[in-house]
Image: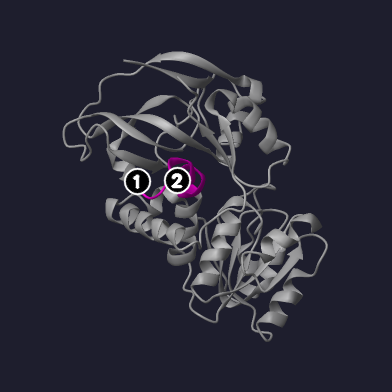
Amino acid sequence: MGARAIVVEAAGPPEAMAWRDVDLPQPGPGELVVRHEAVGVNFLDVLMRAGRGGAAYPARLGVEGAGVVEAAGAGAGFAPGDRVVYAGGPPGAYADRRLLPAARAVALPPDIPSTDAAALFFKGLTAWYLATRTAPLGPGDVALVHAAAGGVGSLLARWLVHRGVRVVATVGSEGKRAAALATGAEAVLVLGQDDVAAAVKAASAGAGARAAFDSVGRDSWEASIDSLGPMGWLVSYGWASGEPQVDLTRLRNAGSLIVTRPTIAHYTAARADLEAGAAEVFALIRAGVLRFEQVETLPLSEVVAAHRRIESRSVAGPVVLVADAP
Protein backbone atom coordinates (compact mmCIF):
# COMPACT_ATOMS: atom_id res chain seq x y z
CA MET A 1 0.00 0.00 0.00
CA GLY A 2 1.32 3.43 -0.87
CA ALA A 3 0.53 7.07 -0.25
CA ARG A 4 1.40 10.55 -1.45
CA ALA A 5 2.76 12.64 1.39
CA ILE A 6 4.55 15.91 2.02
CA VAL A 7 8.14 15.47 3.16
CA VAL A 8 10.36 18.33 4.35
CA GLU A 9 14.03 17.42 3.95
CA ALA A 10 15.32 20.53 5.75
CA ALA A 11 13.84 23.61 7.37
CA GLY A 12 12.93 26.29 4.90
CA PRO A 13 10.23 28.34 3.14
CA PRO A 14 6.94 26.86 1.92
CA GLU A 15 8.72 25.51 -1.14
CA ALA A 16 10.68 23.19 1.16
CA MET A 17 7.57 20.99 1.21
CA ALA A 18 7.73 18.34 -1.51
CA TRP A 19 5.32 15.57 -2.46
CA ARG A 20 6.77 12.07 -2.30
CA ASP A 21 5.49 8.56 -2.93
CA VAL A 22 5.86 6.76 0.41
CA ASP A 23 5.28 3.21 1.54
CA LEU A 24 2.29 2.69 3.80
CA PRO A 25 2.47 -0.55 5.78
CA GLN A 26 -0.56 -2.55 6.73
CA PRO A 27 -1.87 -1.36 10.09
CA GLY A 28 -0.61 -3.27 13.10
CA PRO A 29 -2.47 -3.74 16.38
CA GLY A 30 -4.07 -0.48 17.47
CA GLU A 31 -3.40 1.27 14.14
CA LEU A 32 -5.52 2.64 11.32
CA VAL A 33 -5.03 3.63 7.71
CA VAL A 34 -7.10 6.77 7.15
CA ARG A 35 -7.93 8.20 3.72
CA HIS A 36 -8.13 11.95 4.21
CA GLU A 37 -11.13 13.95 3.09
CA ALA A 38 -9.92 17.15 4.76
CA VAL A 39 -6.74 18.25 6.54
CA GLY A 40 -6.46 21.19 8.90
CA VAL A 41 -3.58 23.63 8.50
CA ASN A 42 -2.30 24.96 11.82
CA PHE A 43 0.35 27.51 12.67
CA LEU A 44 2.27 24.69 14.36
CA ASP A 45 2.78 23.20 10.89
CA VAL A 46 4.31 26.45 9.66
CA LEU A 47 6.67 26.55 12.65
CA MET A 48 7.76 22.94 12.12
CA ARG A 49 8.41 23.51 8.42
CA ALA A 50 10.42 26.65 9.16
CA GLY A 51 12.58 25.00 11.83
CA ARG A 52 10.93 26.58 14.87
CA GLY A 53 8.75 23.69 15.99
CA GLY A 54 11.28 21.12 17.17
CA ALA A 55 10.98 18.89 14.10
CA ALA A 56 13.65 16.34 13.16
CA TYR A 57 14.31 16.23 9.43
CA PRO A 58 13.29 14.76 7.11
CA ALA A 59 9.91 15.61 8.59
CA ARG A 60 6.26 14.98 7.93
CA LEU A 61 3.77 17.76 8.63
CA GLY A 62 0.17 18.08 9.77
CA VAL A 63 -1.48 17.10 13.06
CA GLU A 64 -5.18 17.28 12.18
CA GLY A 65 -7.33 15.45 9.68
CA ALA A 66 -10.71 13.93 8.98
CA GLY A 67 -11.52 11.06 6.70
CA VAL A 68 -12.50 7.43 6.28
CA VAL A 69 -10.86 4.33 7.72
CA GLU A 70 -9.51 2.14 4.92
CA ALA A 71 -7.92 -0.55 7.09
CA ALA A 72 -7.77 -1.28 10.80
CA GLY A 73 -5.42 -3.40 12.88
CA ALA A 74 -6.44 -5.71 15.68
CA GLY A 75 -7.97 -3.94 18.66
CA ALA A 76 -8.16 -0.59 16.88
CA GLY A 77 -11.82 -0.09 17.78
CA PHE A 78 -12.72 1.08 14.27
CA ALA A 79 -13.67 -0.68 11.05
CA PRO A 80 -13.17 0.14 7.36
CA GLY A 81 -15.71 2.75 6.30
CA ASP A 82 -15.87 4.50 9.67
CA ARG A 83 -15.55 8.30 9.59
CA VAL A 84 -12.93 9.62 12.01
CA VAL A 85 -11.22 12.83 12.99
CA TYR A 86 -7.97 13.27 14.88
CA ALA A 87 -5.79 15.96 16.39
CA GLY A 88 -2.29 15.63 17.75
CA GLY A 89 -0.16 12.56 17.65
CA PRO A 90 2.69 12.03 15.21
CA PRO A 91 2.73 14.54 12.34
CA GLY A 92 1.75 13.23 8.93
CA ALA A 93 -1.64 14.66 8.01
CA TYR A 94 -0.30 16.28 4.83
CA ALA A 95 -0.97 13.15 2.81
CA ASP A 96 -3.76 11.54 0.84
CA ARG A 97 -3.76 8.70 3.38
CA ARG A 98 -1.73 7.84 6.44
CA LEU A 99 -1.04 5.33 9.19
CA LEU A 100 -2.41 6.60 12.50
CA PRO A 101 -2.49 5.35 16.10
CA ALA A 102 -6.15 4.53 16.67
CA ALA A 103 -5.86 6.03 20.16
CA ARG A 104 -5.69 9.50 18.56
CA ALA A 105 -8.85 9.10 16.46
CA VAL A 106 -12.45 9.64 17.49
CA ALA A 107 -15.61 8.81 15.60
CA LEU A 108 -16.82 11.75 13.52
CA PRO A 109 -20.59 12.21 13.91
CA PRO A 110 -22.53 11.96 10.63
CA ASP A 111 -23.95 15.49 10.97
CA ILE A 112 -20.51 17.17 11.03
CA PRO A 113 -18.83 17.56 7.61
CA SER A 114 -15.18 16.61 7.30
CA THR A 115 -14.24 20.17 6.31
CA ASP A 116 -15.84 21.55 9.49
CA ALA A 117 -14.07 18.93 11.57
CA ALA A 118 -10.69 19.72 10.01
CA ALA A 119 -11.21 23.43 10.62
CA LEU A 120 -12.41 23.13 14.20
CA PHE A 121 -11.25 19.94 15.91
CA PHE A 122 -7.63 20.71 16.84
CA LYS A 123 -8.37 24.34 17.69
CA GLY A 124 -11.60 23.37 19.42
CA LEU A 125 -9.89 20.75 21.59
CA THR A 126 -7.29 23.34 22.50
CA ALA A 127 -10.01 25.80 23.47
CA TRP A 128 -11.71 23.03 25.47
CA TYR A 129 -8.78 22.21 27.72
CA LEU A 130 -7.83 25.87 28.11
CA ALA A 131 -11.35 26.99 29.02
CA THR A 132 -12.28 24.07 31.24
CA ARG A 133 -9.13 22.44 32.62
CA THR A 134 -6.27 24.90 33.09
CA ALA A 135 -7.59 27.59 35.44
CA PRO A 136 -10.49 27.66 37.93
CA LEU A 137 -12.99 29.97 36.24
CA GLY A 138 -16.70 30.39 36.80
CA PRO A 139 -19.56 32.66 35.79
CA GLY A 140 -18.78 36.30 36.46
CA ASP A 141 -15.02 35.85 36.56
CA VAL A 142 -12.95 38.10 34.28
CA ALA A 143 -10.42 36.55 31.89
CA LEU A 144 -7.95 38.16 29.52
CA VAL A 145 -7.63 36.44 26.13
CA HIS A 146 -4.82 37.51 23.83
CA ALA A 147 -4.99 37.08 20.03
CA ALA A 148 -8.77 36.79 20.22
CA ALA A 149 -9.23 37.23 16.47
CA GLY A 150 -7.06 34.21 15.75
CA GLY A 151 -8.03 30.58 15.35
CA VAL A 152 -7.63 29.26 18.89
CA GLY A 153 -8.07 32.65 20.53
CA SER A 154 -11.48 33.29 18.98
CA LEU A 155 -12.79 29.83 19.88
CA LEU A 156 -11.41 30.17 23.40
CA ALA A 157 -13.13 33.53 23.87
CA ARG A 158 -16.41 32.09 22.57
CA TRP A 159 -16.12 29.09 24.90
CA LEU A 160 -15.42 31.25 27.95
CA VAL A 161 -18.31 33.59 27.16
CA HIS A 162 -20.55 30.53 26.77
CA ARG A 163 -19.55 29.52 30.32
CA GLY A 164 -20.46 32.94 31.68
CA VAL A 165 -16.90 34.25 31.96
CA ARG A 166 -16.46 37.93 31.16
CA VAL A 167 -13.76 38.27 28.51
CA VAL A 168 -11.43 41.18 27.85
CA ALA A 169 -9.54 40.51 24.63
CA THR A 170 -6.53 41.78 22.73
CA VAL A 171 -5.72 41.77 19.02
CA GLY A 172 -2.65 42.65 17.02
CA SER A 173 -4.14 45.44 14.93
CA GLU A 174 -7.11 47.76 14.68
CA GLY A 175 -8.49 45.83 11.73
CA LYS A 176 -9.02 42.74 13.90
CA ARG A 177 -11.01 44.47 16.62
CA ALA A 178 -14.43 43.72 15.08
CA ALA A 179 -13.67 40.01 14.75
CA ALA A 180 -12.72 39.80 18.42
CA LEU A 181 -15.83 41.70 19.49
CA ALA A 182 -17.91 39.15 17.58
CA THR A 183 -16.77 36.47 20.04
CA GLY A 184 -18.73 38.16 22.82
CA ALA A 185 -15.77 39.87 24.46
CA GLU A 186 -16.77 42.90 26.53
CA ALA A 187 -13.77 44.95 25.46
CA VAL A 188 -11.08 44.55 22.81
CA LEU A 189 -7.68 46.25 23.05
CA VAL A 190 -4.92 46.55 20.47
CA LEU A 191 -1.80 45.07 22.02
CA GLY A 192 1.04 47.58 22.08
CA GLN A 193 -1.33 50.48 21.55
CA ASP A 194 -3.98 50.37 24.29
CA ASP A 195 -3.56 50.06 28.06
CA VAL A 196 -4.59 46.44 28.49
CA ALA A 197 -4.17 46.23 32.26
CA ALA A 198 -6.22 49.38 32.83
CA ALA A 199 -9.09 47.97 30.76
CA VAL A 200 -9.01 44.70 32.68
CA LYS A 201 -8.98 46.48 36.02
CA ALA A 202 -11.92 48.64 34.89
CA ALA A 203 -13.90 45.56 33.84
CA SER A 204 -13.19 43.81 37.14
CA ALA A 205 -13.84 46.75 39.50
CA GLY A 206 -10.13 46.89 40.23
CA ALA A 207 -9.76 43.23 41.19
CA GLY A 208 -7.87 42.13 38.08
CA ALA A 209 -8.41 39.09 35.91
CA ARG A 210 -8.74 35.62 37.37
CA ALA A 211 -6.84 34.22 34.39
CA ALA A 212 -4.88 35.44 31.38
CA PHE A 213 -4.65 33.19 28.32
CA ASP A 214 -1.49 34.12 26.46
CA SER A 215 -0.43 32.70 23.10
CA VAL A 216 1.67 35.71 22.11
CA GLY A 217 4.54 35.34 24.58
CA ARG A 218 7.24 37.95 24.87
CA ASP A 219 5.24 40.91 23.54
CA SER A 220 2.24 40.33 25.82
CA TRP A 221 3.88 38.89 28.94
CA GLU A 222 4.02 42.06 31.01
CA ALA A 223 0.47 43.02 30.06
CA SER A 224 -0.69 39.60 31.22
CA ILE A 225 1.07 39.92 34.57
CA ASP A 226 -0.15 43.48 35.12
CA SER A 227 -3.75 42.45 34.34
CA LEU A 228 -4.00 39.59 36.83
CA GLY A 229 -5.41 39.84 40.31
CA PRO A 230 -3.82 38.16 43.35
CA MET A 231 -3.24 34.43 42.84
CA GLY A 232 -4.33 34.75 39.23
CA TRP A 233 -3.47 32.18 36.58
CA LEU A 234 -1.22 33.00 33.62
CA VAL A 235 -1.89 30.31 31.04
CA SER A 236 0.98 30.51 28.55
CA TYR A 237 0.02 28.26 25.65
CA GLY A 238 2.02 29.82 22.81
CA TRP A 239 4.96 32.08 22.05
CA ALA A 240 4.14 33.67 18.69
CA SER A 241 6.39 36.65 19.45
CA GLY A 242 9.11 34.63 21.18
CA GLU A 243 9.64 32.95 24.52
CA PRO A 244 9.11 35.27 27.50
CA GLN A 245 11.61 35.64 30.31
CA VAL A 246 10.05 34.24 33.48
CA ASP A 247 11.03 36.10 36.64
CA LEU A 248 9.79 34.20 39.71
CA THR A 249 10.31 37.18 41.98
CA ARG A 250 8.18 39.29 39.65
CA LEU A 251 5.42 36.70 39.83
CA ARG A 252 5.57 36.70 43.62
CA ASN A 253 5.51 40.47 43.90
CA ALA A 254 2.64 40.78 41.40
CA GLY A 255 0.37 38.75 43.67
CA SER A 256 1.64 35.17 44.02
CA LEU A 257 0.71 34.49 40.41
CA ILE A 258 0.47 30.96 39.04
CA VAL A 259 1.97 30.16 35.62
CA THR A 260 1.22 27.06 33.59
CA ARG A 261 2.54 26.02 30.15
CA PRO A 262 -0.03 23.48 28.93
CA THR A 263 -0.09 21.39 25.76
CA ILE A 264 -2.85 19.43 24.09
CA ALA A 265 -0.73 16.27 24.26
CA HIS A 266 -0.97 16.08 28.04
CA TYR A 267 -4.60 17.12 28.33
CA THR A 268 -5.75 14.50 25.81
CA ALA A 269 -3.27 11.71 26.61
CA ALA A 270 -5.91 9.69 28.46
CA ARG A 271 -8.52 8.21 26.14
CA ALA A 272 -11.32 9.26 28.48
CA ASP A 273 -10.16 12.89 28.35
CA LEU A 274 -9.87 12.86 24.55
CA GLU A 275 -13.37 11.48 24.17
CA ALA A 276 -14.81 13.90 26.74
CA GLY A 277 -13.19 16.86 25.01
CA ALA A 278 -14.34 15.68 21.59
CA ALA A 279 -17.92 15.28 22.81
CA GLU A 280 -17.94 18.84 24.15
CA VAL A 281 -16.40 20.21 20.95
CA PHE A 282 -19.00 18.45 18.80
CA ALA A 283 -21.81 19.70 21.04
CA LEU A 284 -20.66 23.31 20.79
CA ILE A 285 -20.19 23.02 17.02
CA ARG A 286 -23.81 21.90 16.76
CA ALA A 287 -24.91 24.72 19.06
CA GLY A 288 -23.12 27.28 16.90
CA VAL A 289 -20.84 28.36 19.74
CA LEU A 290 -17.69 27.08 18.04
CA ARG A 291 -17.59 28.47 14.54
CA PHE A 292 -15.55 30.52 12.14
CA GLU A 293 -17.16 33.20 10.02
CA GLN A 294 -14.94 32.16 7.12
CA VAL A 295 -13.04 28.98 6.28
CA GLU A 296 -10.76 28.90 3.25
CA THR A 297 -10.48 25.58 1.42
CA LEU A 298 -7.74 24.64 -0.99
CA PRO A 299 -6.91 21.35 -2.71
CA LEU A 300 -4.42 19.24 -0.78
CA SER A 301 -2.03 19.59 -3.72
CA GLU A 302 -1.86 23.37 -3.05
CA VAL A 303 -0.35 23.07 0.42
CA VAL A 304 2.54 25.37 -0.55
CA ALA A 305 0.07 28.12 -1.42
CA ALA A 306 -1.73 27.52 1.88
CA HIS A 307 1.45 28.11 3.87
CA ARG A 308 2.24 31.23 1.84
CA ARG A 309 -1.19 32.66 2.62
CA ILE A 310 -0.90 31.92 6.32
CA GLU A 311 2.54 33.50 6.56
CA SER A 312 1.37 36.58 4.69
CA ARG A 313 -1.58 36.87 7.11
CA SER A 314 -3.90 37.25 4.11
CA VAL A 315 -6.50 34.76 5.36
CA ALA A 316 -9.48 35.76 7.50
CA GLY A 317 -10.03 32.30 8.98
CA PRO A 318 -8.59 28.81 9.11
CA VAL A 319 -7.31 27.02 6.03
CA VAL A 320 -8.47 23.49 5.25
CA LEU A 321 -6.94 21.27 2.58
CA VAL A 322 -9.47 19.03 0.85
CA ALA A 323 -8.75 15.86 -1.07
CA ASP A 324 -8.01 16.39 -4.74
CA ALA A 325 -10.46 14.96 -7.24
CA PRO A 326 -9.38 11.46 -8.33
Q: Nearer the viewer, residue 243 or 162?
A: 162
The 10 Å Cα crowd at callout 2, few under 14, some 14 to 19, many 20 or more, is many
The overriding secondary structure of the stretch rendered in magenta is helix
Q: Position of residue 94 (x, y in %)?
A: 49, 28
Quick one: 244 or 210, which is closer to the camera?
Answer: 210
Which residue lies under the disc numbered 1?
108
Q: Which mark is residue 277?
A: none
Question: Is 144 in front, or is 93?
Answer: 93
Residue 198 visible at all: yes
Q: At numbered mark 2, what does the secondary structure look like: helix, strand or loop?
A: helix
Q: Is residue 226 magenta?
A: no
Q: Position of residue 307 (x, y in %)?
A: 64, 32
Give the residue drawn at x 76%, y 76%.
198
- Residue beneath label 2, please? 117
| Left or right placement of residue 38 versus residue 98 in this view | right
Confirm or deny contact between disc 2 and disc 1 (CB under 8 A): yes
Residue 9 seen:
no
Q: Residue at x 41, y 31 (%)?
A: 36
Magenta region: 110-122
